[in-house]
């Protein structure tokens, strides 16, 4: 986690997790070879409809997270 993701106490702000999730989603689709591709030729695309986050413990500066 980067320094700019943290607050004055050094704890990662809850809203800063979402860009990491989005980056992980993009990389996942890139590794599948489907990034930016339409699926099935009928115009179907990957769309994130909803997102839920359950926080178990705070992250702090320089923590490594696994998504």
Image (tube, rainbow, N blue to C red):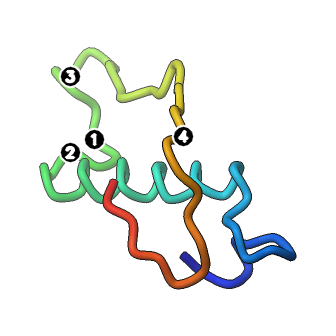
Residue that carries the numbered disc 4 in the rendered image: 55
Q: CA distance from mark 1 to mark 4?
A: 33 Å
- Do the CB atoms of the residues marked 3 and 4 lie less than 8 Å apart? no
For label 4, the crowd category at 10 Å Cα-Cα, with few meaning under 14, some 14 to 19 and many 20 or more, is few
Looking at the rendered structure, the secondary structure element under dot 1 is: loop
Q: Would you say 9 lies left or right of 58 here?
A: right
For label 2, the crowd category at 10 Å Cα-Cα, with few meaning under 14, some 14 to 19 and many 20 or more, is some
Percent across and percent down for residue 62 are: 52, 84
**Which residue does the image show at 35% across and 26% down from the upper left?**
45
Residue that carries the numbered disc 1 in the rendered image: 37
Looking at the rendered structure, the secondary structure element under dot 2 is: loop
Q: Earlier in the sequence, mark 1 or mark 4?
A: 1
Nearer the observer: mark 3 or 2; the answer is 2
Residue that carries the numbered disc 2 in the rendered image: 34
- Do the CB atoms of the residues marked 1 and 4 lie less than 8 Å apart? no
Residue that carries the numbered disc 3 in the rendered image: 41
**Which residue does the image show at 14% across and 52% down from the upper left?**
33
- Do the CB atoms of the residues marked 2 and 1 lie less than 8 Å apart? yes
Nearer the observer: mark 1 or 3; the answer is 1
């Amino acid at each position: 986690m980067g320094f700019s993701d943290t607050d004055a106490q050094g704890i990662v702000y809850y809203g800063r997790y979402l860009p990491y999730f989005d980056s992980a989603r993009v990389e996942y689709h890139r590794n599948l070879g489907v990034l930016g591709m339409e699926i099935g030729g009928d115009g179907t695309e990957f769309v994130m409809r909803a997102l839920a986050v359950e926080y178990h413990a705070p992250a702090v500066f320089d923590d490594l997270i696994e998504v």
